[in-house]
């Protein structure tokens, strides 16, 4: 599983910095994975289509949800790919959430909303505008499985192609905000049926004396 190529292509196409990256998958081998890129940028809304007109409002650029159809035989393969991408892009850490079925008895409404958001299917917009632009033809099927069997989601904030470069206090980064591959952190085993949050820490503050 490879995320870097898709991330790099999207960054070059939009020429916008990233705020965060999320990855969502259901615990079933060889199913599609949803990669969502959350951009930091705004669309200038004008009353008339003229380069001299002033903007009357600024709407956030929608996130981009992409479906990846690469084959994988275990959650650890996605875990390793997410860690590698986050490591190379200079993220401070990676958070992996293992979420249960949102159709189980007693599940809260917010869990269903979080499941929709994880797979790029936001249930609302902002000022009539889309929050996510999705290229994910199998999203409905993935949501059906996730709502019954649960899902996993990874989240990290990239420094190299993101908005965090000027505030990153991290002694492990190169000047451009990247790190030299491969990632030295080993994935934690996924145990089906467990609900937990795992945080993989990469960063080390300057002056800590601990540099990878």
Image (tube, rainbow, N blue to C red):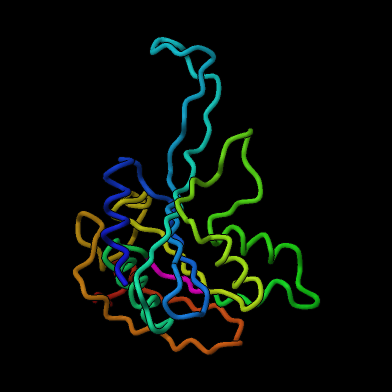
- The quadrant of the image that shows the C terminus is bottom left
Residue in view at x 60 percent, y 51 percent: 122
Magenta: main secondary structure equals strand
Residue 107 versus residue 91: which sits nearer the camera? 107
Q: How many labels does the image show?
A: 0
Residue in view at x 47 percent, y 69 percent: 154
Horizontal and vertical percent position of residue 66: 42, 55
Residue 198 versus residue 164: which sits nearer the camera? 198
Asked if the magenta segment contains residue 107, the reply would be: no
The residue lying furthest to the right in this view is 106
- The quadrant of the image that shows the N terminus is bottom left
Horizontal and vertical percent position of residue 128: 63, 34
Looking at the image, residue 20 lies above or below residue 171: above
Q: Is residue 151 left or right of residue 15?
A: right
Looking at the image, residue 193 lies above or below residue 24: below
Residue 8 versus residue 139: which sits nearer the camera? 139
Horizontal and vertical percent position of residue 68: 38, 63
Residue 57 versus residue 137: which sits nearer the camera? 137
Q: In this view, does 184 lie to the left or right of 127?
A: left
- Residue range in magenta is 92-96
Residue in view at x 55 percent, y 44 percent: 131
Residue in view at x 62 percent, y 64 percent: 115
Asked if the magenta segment contains residue 94, the reply would be: yes
């Amino acid at each position: 599983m490879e995320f870097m190529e898709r991330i790099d292509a999207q960054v070059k196409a939009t020429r916008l910095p990233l705020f965060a990256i999320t990855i969502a998958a259901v615990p079933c081998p060889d199913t599609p994975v949803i990669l969502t890129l959350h951009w930091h940028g705004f669309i200038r809304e004008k009353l008339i289509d003229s380069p001299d007109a002033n903007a009357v409002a600024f709407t956030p650029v929608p996130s981009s949800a992409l479906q990846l159809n690469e084959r994988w035989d275990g959650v650890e393969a996605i875990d390793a790919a997410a860690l590698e991408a986050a490591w190379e892009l200079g993220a401070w850490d990676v958070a992996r959430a293992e979420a249960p079925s949102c159709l189980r008895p007693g599940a809260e409404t917010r869990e269903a909303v979080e499941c929709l958001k994880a797979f790029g299917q936001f249930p609302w917009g902002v000022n009539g505008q889309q929050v996510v632009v999705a290229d994910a033809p199998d999203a409905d099927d993935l949501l059906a499985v996730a709502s019954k069997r649960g899902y996993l989601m990874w989240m990290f904030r990239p420094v190299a192609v993101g908005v965090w470069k000027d505030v990153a206090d991290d002694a492990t980064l190169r000047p451009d905000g990247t790190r030299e591959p491969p990632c030295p952190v080993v994935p934690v085993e996924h145990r089906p049926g467990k609900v937990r949050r795992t945080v993989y820490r990469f960063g080390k503050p300057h002056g800590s004396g601990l540099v990878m």
